Structures are given as C-alpha cells and as structure tokens.
Image (cartoon, rainbow, N blue to C red):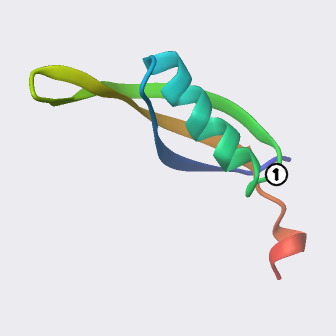
Amino acid sequence: MSLYRVVRLIGSSPNSWEDAAKAALEEAAKHLEDLRVAEVEELDIRMQDNKVVEYRARVRASFRYHPEKHT
C-alpha cells in the first residue's frame, strides 16, 4: 500500500506559465522525494506599468510519503 501527500506550490517566471510551473516543481524536487503527479490549478499574471512582468502558476503536486523516514 502506498501513501501520498499533496502540497500546493506557486512558481513564477518572466517568460511563461509553463516555465512558472516547471520552476515550482524543480524547486520542490530539491526538498521532496518521489514527486509523482502535478496538476496546474490556477494561472495568473502580475503586471506593472501596464506590462506583463511575471507569469505565475499554482500547482498541486503529490509525492510518496515514507513514514519510516519520519518517525
């Protein structure tokens, strides 16, 4: 039997939503083991002086939970 945890992440990029989601997952992978599935929940854009300055992606990601490592 496997057990998974789910976390919400927000990534940002000056280039695209795809890069924003990728940035969030790549950073999470540095801290979490066994990332499995990710789902983009929401996309938005931050603007300044009527120009797009940042794409943001809210991502829900699951990773395998290893309780034996957390006791």
Quarter of the C terminus within the rendering: bottom right
The percent position of residue 11, horizontal first and vertical second, equals 48, 38
Task: Name the kind of residue labelled 1 in the image.
Answer: Glu
- In the image, what residue occupies the spot 67% across and 30% down? 37
Q: Considering only vertical position in the picture, is 16 above or below 10?
A: above
The percent position of residue 2, horizontal first and vertical second, equals 82, 47
- In the image, what residue occupies the spot 69% across and 38% down? 26
- Taking the image as shown, residue 13 lies to the left or right of residue 28, namely left
Residue under numbered circle 1: 33
- In the image, what residue occupies the spot 45% across and 17% down? 16
The percent position of residue 29, horizontal first and vertical second, equals 74, 46
* Residue at the far bottom in the pictured view: 71
Is residue 29 visible in the rendered structure shown here?
A: yes
The percent position of residue 48, horizontal first and vertical second, equals 15, 32
For the image shown, how many numbered marks are present on the structure?
A: 1
| Viewer-nearest residue: 61 or 26 | 26
Local SS, label 1: loop
* Residue at the far front in the pictured view: 49
Where, by quadrant of the figure, is residue 12 drawn? top left
- In the image, what residue occupies the spot 56% across and 39% down? 24
Label 1: few (<14), some (14–19) or many (≥20) C-alpha neighbours in 10 Å: few
